[in-house]
Amino acid sequence: MYTIDNTYKYSLEEKKSTFLAYLTPFENFEELLQELKEQHPKARHFVRASRTLNEFEQIVESFSDDGEPKGTSGVPTLKVLQGFDLIEVGVIVVRYFGGTLLGTGGLARAYSDVVNFAVEDANLFQYTKKSKKSLHVKYSDLGKFEHRAKKFGIDIEKEEFIEDGVFISCEASKERLEKFLDSSVLLYNLIS
């Protein structure tokens, strides 16, 4: 499985209709949808599809035709995500109607083409499930902890400063996080 780390945009014109595809990490999906609706108030459709993993490691897929004829837009966009074996991603296609009907085949082709082009332009990388840990670090060890975390490629999600130190939430692949925690054991207390 593959994923992305940025939002990628691709534009396609088909018989005077404009299709704007936005391929984004799933964590940004809902926020991006709202932004696009504000940025494109005259757009006719906001077709979308997504693929994520639930807590049981099962793939959860969704799509919406957003007023297009059933099966002509949401399903073709989802099939592109499936074809590239993408996970933890969403795609939104903004459509401006150009006055010429494309027919069901033309619509399906236009939606799948614009998403295909967006995926081909994207920087895909192997998906790795991330693990999260919460730790307590003394103030005196915070600098060393942050330096080691950066060296190991650990993402510090949140730091909460309290009276006797800092609560830190961090995230990385399970293997990377385990190596980091094993090598930094004197710098923290594991919370969860």
Image (cartoon, rainbow, N blue to C red):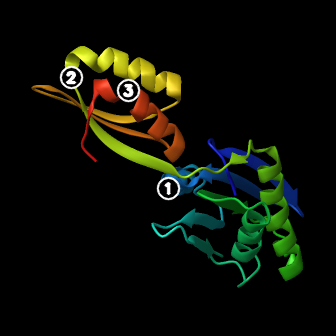
Mark nearer the viewer, 2 or 3: 3
The residue carrying mark 3 is 184
Q: How far from the left and from the top, in percent, is residue 28? A: 52, 50
Q: Residue at (79%, 66%) from the top-left corner? A: 83
**Residue 67 located left or right of residue 106:** left
Disc 3 crowd rating (10 Å Cα; few below 14, some 14-19, many 20+) is some
**Label 2 element class:** loop
Counting residues from the N terminus, which is met first, the one under dot 1 or under dot 2?
A: 1
Mark 2–mark 3 Cα distance, whole angstroms, equals 13 Å
Mark 2 sits on what residue? 138
Residue 153 vs residue 39, the one in the foreground: 153
User: Image point 60% across, 53% down: which residue?
Assistant: 40
Q: Amino acid at mark 1?
A: Gln
Give the labeled residue for mark 1.
Answer: 34
- Relative image position of residue 100 (x, y in whole percent): 86, 71
Q: Secondary structure at mark 3?
A: loop
Q: Residue furthest bottom?
A: 70
Q: What residue lies at 53% left-to-right and 43% top-to-bottom?
A: 175
